[in-house]
Image (cartoon, grey):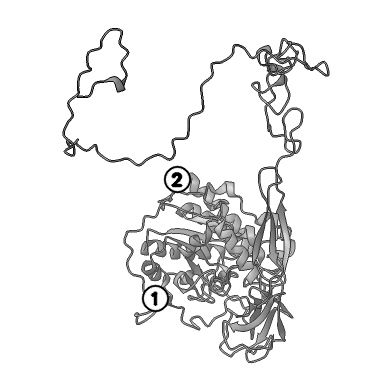
Amino acid sequence: MKQQNLKRPLRGPLPACRRLLLAAALLAALLAAGCSGGAASSAAASGAAASSMAANPDDADYDAAAGVIDKTAFGGTVLEETEDAGRAYLDETLFLGDSNTYRYMMYGDESGQAFTGLDNNIGVVSMGAGAIPTLKCMQFKGYASPVTMPEAVALIQPRRIIVCFGTNNLGGGTESFIKSYREGLAAIHKAYEYADIIVSAVPPLDQQRENGSLSMKQVDAFNAAIAAMCQEEGYKFLDTSEALKDPATGWARKDYTLGDGVHLSKDGVTALFQYIRTHAYITEDTRPKPLKPVPKAEGVPPGLISQDPIAVRGARVPVEFVAGEGGHIEGQASQKVKKGQSCSAVTAVPDDGWEFDYWTASLGSAGGGATLTFTVPGDADANGIVITAHFSEKEHTHEWRETGRTEPTCEAAGAIYYECKWCDEERTESIGATGHGSPDAGGKCPVCGAQLAQPCPVCGQIGHGADACPSNQPVCTFCGQQGHTADSCLNKCPVCGGSLLAGDHTHSETPDPGPEQPDPGPEQPDPGPEQPDPGPEQPETPDTSDPPQTEQPDPPQIPGEDLTPSDTPAG
C-alpha cells in the first residue's frame, strides 16, 4: 500500500537542547560551504551572481559520501520510499520553483503528457527563495495584474505543494538563504494552511558545468540546512539527490543536465518525477469543501527577471531535440546556440513500422522535414527550447512473431502469444487440451498422474466394479462355469441330463411330450368382418300381417295304434 503519513502540524519553538543540535548542524553546513553569510545581491533573484568561471577550489577534494543526507538524524522528516502513487498524485500537487521547475512543463511521460501544466506549475526563471513573498509572478484570467506565489496558492487551493528553490541562491550564504526560504514558506502556509508543504532538494550540478565557480559542496550544504529547517518547521524534505546524483562521484548523473551543467534535461526530469511518485506523502485531505472556483492560469509573464544570478545564461541558449514515440534523434540532441543563429542539423529517424510526422518547438518555428536546422529566436531565455519530433504508425499488414506460449495439459488449454512486428498489436492463439492417456494398472493418467479409474475392490483390476467383476459371479455346480447356476445351465442335455460339453451328443428318441391334449374340435369359420353397430335398440312393433294362430292340442292316441300324420283323420 502507499505510505500514509499523518499530517504534521507546524510547530512552535523547540526545546533548548533541540535548538542547540540544529544550530550545530547549520553551523557545519556553513563551514562546509565556505561561505561568508553575505546577503543576495538581487532582491528578486535573492542570489549573487558568480564573477568567475574558474573551477571552485572548494570542490577539489569533494567527497561524495559527505554530501549524503543522514535520514536517521531528522526523525521522519525525510520522505521514505513508497509504492508508486501514480499520475493522480502529481495532478493534485502544486509545483513552485525556478527555471528547473518551469522545465517540468516542457517534458512528458511515456504517454506524451507533460509532467505538469499551467494549472499546477509556477516556475520562474532566475527566481531565488527571497522573492517568494513579494514577486508578482503568476497571471490569472480576469485579474488585472499578476499575483505572488502565496496569493496564487490561496487561489489554486492545492492538496499539497512541492517547493524547489536554491540554485539561483548559489554563491550567496547558506544562513541568509535559509532565513529567506523560511520566510517564504511561512508566507505560503499562512496564505493557505490546508496544504501539505514538501521542500525538494537543490538539484546537483554537472561536474563539467559552464559556471565552474558554482560549488557542489555548497549544494550539499544547502540541502543539509533545508532538511534541518524542515524538521524544525514541520515540513517534509524530499531528497531528490538520491535520484539525480551519481553515487560514485556525487555530481549529477550523466546526461541529467543540459550543456550548462545546471538545468535538468529530459532524462533528469523523468528520473525526478519517478522519484516523486515513489516517495509520496499522502495525508487526510482537510481542505474546506466544496473548493472555491479556481481562475484559469495564464502563466508567468515573460522576462519577469532580467538578472542572471548564477551566470549561466550568456549569449547562448540551450536547445534540446527529443523524439516522441516511434523514433529517435540522430545528431547532436543537446546544443547551446546564440540567439538568431542556427543549430547543427539533426534528423528524426522513425523506428520500424513508423514514419516521421512533424516537429513542434516550445519557442519559435520548426520546419516540416525529417532533417531540421533550427534557428534560435531572439526572445529565447535561460529556460531554453525543446524541439520534439513526432511520429505516426504506418498502415501495414500484421506480421506476427511469437513472443511466448503456455503449453496445454491433459485438462487445460494452452496458448501461443504473438505480437506484430510493425506495431504493438497482439493476438493469442488457443491450443486445445491434450486429453488424458490410457490409465495405467493403478488407474492413473501416465502423463499427469490424475486418478482416472478406481480398481475393482474384489479383484483389483481396472475397468469394472464389484457387480461386474468376474471373480464375484456365481459358479454353475453342473458345468463349473461362472455366470450362471445349475438351474439355468445350457450345457445340460434336456433328454438325458448329460453334459453337452463332452463333444457330439445326440439321441434317436424324442422326449415324452406328456398326456394327450383333448381335440379342440373343428376349426370355426371366420365370422367375417365386424359388422357396424346397429345403433340403439328399436322397440318391438306388433306383426299385423297375419292373425295369431291358436295352437291345437294333439289328438288322443289310441293304445297300440301307430299313427302317422297321414293317418290323422281329416277334420
Q: In which quarter of the image is residue 341?
A: bottom right
Whether residue 34 can be seen here: no
Position of 451 relative to 93 (above/below)? above
Q: Residue 190 carries which label?
A: none
Position of 295 relative to 277 (above/below)? below
Viewer-proximal residue among 536 and 179: 536
Provide the residue designation for mark 2: 15
Question: Which quadrant would the C terminus be assigned to in this image?
Answer: top left
Position of 340 relative to 217 (above/below)? below
Disc 2 versus disc 1: distance between alpha carbons? 45 Å
Pointer 1 local density, CA inside 10 Å: few below 14, some 14–19, many at least 20: some
**Residue 448, image x, y percentages:** 72, 38
**Residue 179, image x, y percentages:** 48, 63
The reply, left or right, for residue 228 in relation to residue 270 is: left
The residue at the far right in this view is 503
The residue at the far bottom in this view is 340
Provide the residue designation for mark 1: 296
Secondary element type, mark 2 = loop
Position of 502 relative to 523 (above/below)? above
Whether residue 85 can be seen here: yes
Question: Of the residues shown, which amino acid type is indicated by label 2?
Answer: Pro
The reply, left or right, for residue 155 in relation to residue 20 is: left
Sequence-wise, which precedes: disc 2 or disc 1? 2
Secondary element type, mark 1 = loop
Viewer-proximal residue among 212 and 281: 281
**Residue 343, image x, y percentages:** 69, 87
Question: Of the residues shown, which amino acid type is indicated by label 1?
Answer: Lys
